[in-house]
Structure formats: C-alpha cells, structure tokens
Image (tube, rainbow, N blue to C red):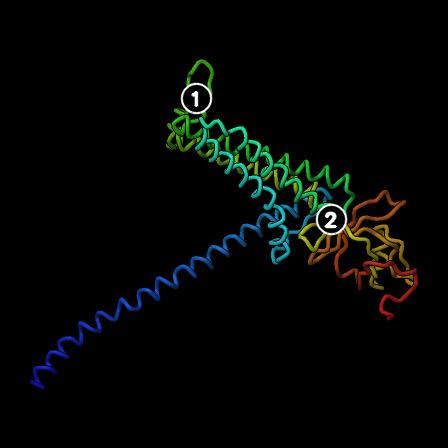
Amino acid sequence: MTDAASANDSAAGPDSSHEAVPAFGPTRWAAMPFEMLVKSLAAIAALFYVVGFFTTNSYLYLLGVSDFSLLRTRFILTGVLTLTPLVLALMGGIYAAVDMAAHRDDAGLTSRAYLWILVDIALPFTLYFALFSIVAENDPVASARDAALLSAICAVIVLMVLATVALYRQSGRRPLSHLASRRKPFSYERFHTRFGIPEAIVESLIFAVGGFVLFLLYLGIFGQYFYPSLPEQLGGGRPRNAQLLIAAEAIPAARELGLDVSEESPLSPPIQLLWEGEDSYVIRLPRPHNRSVVQLARGLVDGVVTGATLASGENPAAP
C-alpha cells in the first residue's frame, strides 16, 4: 500500500508541477498592465515634450533666434500647457457629435445644443480667462481678449476635424472623390500608375498631411501669441525684468552688442530677459537701442539679477 501510494504521488508529481505553472500566469498578466501603463506614460510624456519643443521654438522664431537644446524637461510642461485648450475643445466637440448622432430626431436637441455651447465655449473661456488674468496676473481686458481668441481657435479646429471625419464616413471613405462638380469624382489614376499607391490611401494621406499642417499652425499661433503671456512657472515664456552681471573679459563684447556696461560698472541696466537657454540668454535692449533682441552666450555672463533692480555699481553678491 505504501509503495502504491508512493507510486501514485510520484505519478502525480509531474502533473502537480505542471499545474503550478499557470499559477505564475496571473502574476505575469498582472504585470503586463503596469508595463503598458509605463509605456503609455512615456509615450504621453514624449508627445508633450515634442509639442513643447515646437511651441517654444515658434516663439523664438518670432524673436529671430533658436534654441535646439533637447534635454529640457521644461518642454513637457509647455506641451501640457499647449495641448490642454485643444483637448478641452475636442472633448466638448466629441460630446456634441455623439449627442447629435444619438438624438438626431429628438425634440430635445435644442436644449442639448445649448448645453454643448455652455460646455465647449463658456467653460473653456472661463478657464482661460482665469489662467491669463488671475494666475498669470495679466491685464483683465487683454486676458478676456486672449481667452476669447484661444477658445475660438480651438473651436474652429475641432469643428474642422469633426466635419472632416463625418464627411469621410458618409462618403464611403472617399471624401475628395465626391466633392467635384457635376458629380464627377476626382481620379488619382496617374498617381496610382506612377507610384503604385491605391487611390483610397492617397486621399487618406492628403487628409493626414492636412491635419498635421493644421496642428503645426495651431502650435505656431499658440507659441507666438499666447506663450509669451504666461509665466515660466506654468510652462510659458513671459519676459522677465533682469540685470546681467557681465564677465570682466566680456565687457568690450557686451558694449559692442549695445549693453551699457563698463569695467567699473559691469552690472547692466534693467533689460527684458526673453529666454534663458542652456547656452545663451536672449534679451531685449532698453531704449535708445530700438529695443533690439540680442543673444548672449552664457560665458559672457557671471550672474543674473531678477526681481528688484540694483543700483549701478552695487555688488549683487552683498547680503
């Protein structure tokens, strides 16, 4: 009996060990969502980084300078700041589109449309006005104008996207082919013959390129118009009043660039610090230098004074 039991146990051993393998399965499947979460967060952070990079350089393009330093985590915050208005408008637009599709023949569509206007226009305007006026401490009139303009731009972009998607679905996924006059569809036969790309893919590429250009246009508008109105702590690039302490050996070069400094007084008069990069400072000279924009290498500057200005000749290192 004992030998038989031992034989049964030994025979059941491989089966029990085989049954133990799936016990690792739930652990493995439980670890996969976490891995996917990490990858998703990394992809979102990369998207914010790229958006912030393009937004910042569109602002610098307006100044006539550039900064292609890649290792700047500040770009992530700028990307969040740039995409938030567009995401809010897109959420409201999707809600309106789904609601209209579900209640197309419903008599209550008018009240739902009013609700969409409140959510997709009034709420973003209120949030942007609070951001520009209260948080960024800008002029209330200018803040209201900027909030209204940003809300309108985002609403127009979302309407264009939703209208394109609706047209694409209702026209058999061949929107351009049904827009020609006299019901004669566009033909991509020459393009298909020359490059071997199906006509449907050609039309999809046209819309993809158009959407990408529209998105870049939004980044350019935001970077050149709204980005300079928001403080650096929020991811913006609002100019700061500052004074630069010029290095002793760089004083002749700084004077040639228009800074009123000397060996006896290396501290510059108050200027606008437009951008602080890893390798340079971008400043705007005061009058009477026609408020020119100057890019200084960081090696020319020993220190930066922000906040309260110092008198000429005063030691900034003194307590």
Of residues 193 and 6, the one drawn nearer to the viewer in this rendering: 6
Where residue 141 sits, quadrant-wise, is top right
Of residues 22 and 229, the one drawn nearer to the viewer in this rendering: 22
Which residue lies at the image location 17% right of the left edge and 76% below the top edge? 13
Where residue 305 sits, quadrant-wise, is bottom right
Of residues 58 and 164, the one drawn nearer to the viewer in this rendering: 164
Instruction: Give the amino acid type for the residue marked by disc 2 in the picture.
Output: Ile
Which residue lies at the image location 71% right of the left edge and 45% below the top edge? 132
Name the residue beneath numbered marker 2.
Answer: 134
Residue 61 visible in rendering: no
Name the residue beneath numbered marker 1.
Answer: 178
Question: Going by the image, does 24 lie left or right of 136?
Answer: left
Of residues 87 and 74, the one drawn nearer to the viewer in this rendering: 87
- For numbered disc 2, what is the local secondary structure? helix
Instruction: Give the amino acid type for the residue marked by disc 1 in the picture.
Output: His
Question: Going by the image, does 108 lie left or right of 150?
Answer: left
